[in-house]
Amino acid sequence: MTNFKSVVAMLKKASFMGAFFLLLSCDSAAATSFCSIKDAPTEYAVRNVVDGDTIRLQDDRRVRLIGINAPEMGGRGRTTEPYAVQAKRRLTALIKANNNKVSLRVGEHSQDRYGRILANLYDRNGVSLEEQMVAEGLAYHVVVAPNVELAHCLAQAESYPRQQRIGLWKNVSFISTQELNQGGFTLLQGRIQSVQRNRGGVWLELEHSVSVNIPLSSLPYFKNERFAQWQGRTLKTRGWVSERKGQSKKYAKWRLTASHPSMLELQ
């Protein structure tokens, strides 16, 4: 497996992908920085690693890593996704190398609906564990506002493994809206047929009954974007797709929320 240090070295020489990344319209200084911090916060002992993006602390609290989504481990009728085992093993090794301890920086939104703490994880040197997982192709970069602090550097960390088809990027691809047949985390692409704006924010209506919603609360991250000009262009996005069941036919069947520019790529 390509290690983190060599990936970072190659990232410094690599250019961004040919597609237009919306994140490039944001603060360029932030976009070119990496995710490490100078002074790591207080360390906490780790009991075990649940999967590639979740750990359990010694005091029994569960922590969900901000900014990434790793493949799911099997259980409760679900099959183990490709690279889930490798992701769990790698995160375990990173924590073990830090004497089974991690530093936490809790997000602005501090807890998810499952009661897990939402935090960025660092080792004793302030190195981001999320960045290492993404840079080695073992997790996807994903942003759920308002926890956006590492959005730009994690997007940059992902660029090299994605270009070189490393790890989970070896076989994965963005599926078309026509292929969409189930909910859950999805890499999706389709043509924007129309753009609407209302109290719920901006709605990008794609082919085959798919809506991508940019919530009203997230619009400050999209400064100066002229959404009306997006109509007719191809969009690549990622996130958790949900199916609207039993609702009026005037609404799209599938919905995905994108709360930060780095979750959208226009072509």
Image (tube, helix red, strand yellow):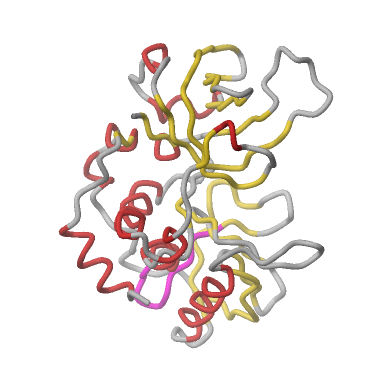
In the image, 225 versus 150, the foreground residue is: 225
Looking at the rendered image, the quarter that the N terminus falls into is bottom left
The magenta-colored residue range is: 119-127
Horizontal relation, residue 72 to residue 131: left or right: right
* Rendering quarter of residue 251: top right
- Is 223 positioned to the left or the right of 244 in the image? left
Location of the C terminus by quadrant is top left
Based on the picture, tell me whether residue 207 belongs to the magenta stretch.
no
Q: At 45% from the left edge and 52% from the top edge, which residue is drawn?
A: 141
* Image quadrant in which you'd find residue 241: top right
Percent of width and height locating residue 111: 65, 52
Q: Is residue 121 magenta?
A: yes
Residue at 67% x, 50% y: name it. 112
Number of numbered labels in the structure image: 0
- In the depicted structure, whether residue 184 falls above or below residue 259: below
Q: 77 and 101: which one is in front?
A: 77
Q: Position of residue 40 (x, y in %)?
A: 40, 70
Write down the quadrant of residue 220 in the picture: top left
Q: Give percent across and percent down for residue 2.
A: 33, 74
- The residue shown at (46%, 48%) is 173
Tell which of 150 and 246 is nearer to you. Answer: 246
**Identity of the residue furthest to the right in this view:** 246
Q: Is residue 263 left or right of residue 217?
A: left
Where is 263 relative to 40, above or below?
Answer: above
In the image, farthest residue toward the front? 179
Q: Residue at x 66, y 46 (%)?
A: 184
Q: Is residue 238 above or below residue 75?
A: above
User: Residue 52, position in %: x, y?
Assistant: 56, 68
